[in-house]
Image: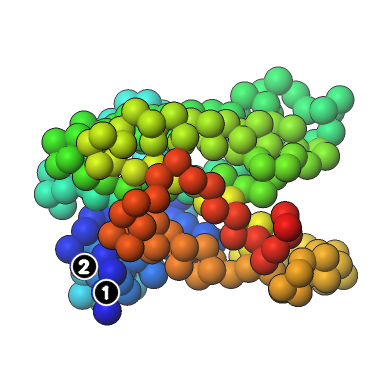
């Protein structure tokens, strides 16, 4: 059963990692996918081909969600090209980790801009289309770090906690128009980025998780499918921790 048949989704930051996993699982569930990437043109072209081969319509856009005008342009283009915007997944994000005493103002501002302001930009950009349709599902990617904090990540934690407050407010504002806004807070997800870490470090993290493993991009994508589909028609303003029990 394809849960997203005929729906159009925008997924930001989808050329690799969690974003790529979401784009693929959405396509498998019948969604048409417009995705953004920042620099990896080859990876984006590859993904576009892969998704189109699944019999849906997919298109990659080089677009910076942290730029207000680019976000507006993207939403307009997707609405024109695909005819609707039913789902928005705000997934684009970066880290610039350091202890507070060492974080530069620039590193703080950049992380807030890419991780948090992009969510404002994109949500505002798709809002008009979703209001006209009188339906929509907005899914924002936070992190367990946004829920509980983490030493050496004040900028990242602030951006990810901000996403939760923003999403709850959007849920309250747009609920009467049947537009839902929810948050996923991933735990330790194993992607290309974590693949570069020392094996012992990774094993010690796995050991500390009740399910004794890191998550996969598909683990996050499956929860996204639930929140994007009509199965969660009565769920809004929520934060789902997808973390193997890490915050239990």
Q: Which residue is mark 1?
A: 2
Tell me the residue at 74%/40% (across/down): 149
Pointer 2 local density, CA inside 10 Å: few below 14, some 14–19, many at least 20: some
- Apparent side of residue 43 relative to residue 99 in the rendered image (left or right): left
Residue 218 higher or lower than 66, as above or below: below
Pointer 1 local density, CA inside 10 Å: few below 14, some 14–19, many at least 20: few
Frontmost residue, 178 versus 70: 178
- Apparent side of residue 5 relative to residue 205 in the rendered image (left or right): left
Can residue 66 be seen in the rendering of this structure? no
Looking at the rendered image, the quarter that the N terminus falls into is: bottom left
The location of residue 216, given as percent across then percent down, is 58, 70
Q: Are marks 2 and 1 in contact (CB under 8 Å)?
A: yes
Frontmost residue, 136 versus 24: 136
Residue 116 higher or lower than 82, as above or below: above
Can residue 8 be seen in the rendering of this structure? yes
Looking at the rendered image, the quarter that the C terminus falls into is: bottom right
Tell me the residue at 34%/28% (across/down): 173
Tell me the residue at 81%/38% (across/down): 152
């Amino acid at each position: 059963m394809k849960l997203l048949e005929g729906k159009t989704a925008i997924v930001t930051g989808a050329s690799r990692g969690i974003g790529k996993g979401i784009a693929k699982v959405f396509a498998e569930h019948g969604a048409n996918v417009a995705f953004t990437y920042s620099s990896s043109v080859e990876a984006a072209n590859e993904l576009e081909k892969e998704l189109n081969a699944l019999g849906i319509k997919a298109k990659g856009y080089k677009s910076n969600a942290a730029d207000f005008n680019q976000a507006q342009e993207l939403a307009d283009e997707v609405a024109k090209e695909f005819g609707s915007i039913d789902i928005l997944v705000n997934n684009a994000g970066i880290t610039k980790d350091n202890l507070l005493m060492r974080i530069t103002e620039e590193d703080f501002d950049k992380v807030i801009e890419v991780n948090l302001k992009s969510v404002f930009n994109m949500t505002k950009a798709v809002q008009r289309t979703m209001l006209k349709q009188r339906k929509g599902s907005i899914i924002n990617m936070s992190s367990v770090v946004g829920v509980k904090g983490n030493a050496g990540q004040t900028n990242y934690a602030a951006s990810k906690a901000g996403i939760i407050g923003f999403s709850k407010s959007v849920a309250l504002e747009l609920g009467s128009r049947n537009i839902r806004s929810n948050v996923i807070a991933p735990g330790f997800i194993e992607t290309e980025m974590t693949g570069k870490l020392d094996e012992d470090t990774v094993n010690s993290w796995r050991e500390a998780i009740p399910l004794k493993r890191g998550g996969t991009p598909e683990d996050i994508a499956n929860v996204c499918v639930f929140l994007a589909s009509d199965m969660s028609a009565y769920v809004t303003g929520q934060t789902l921790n997808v973390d193997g029990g890490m915050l239990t």
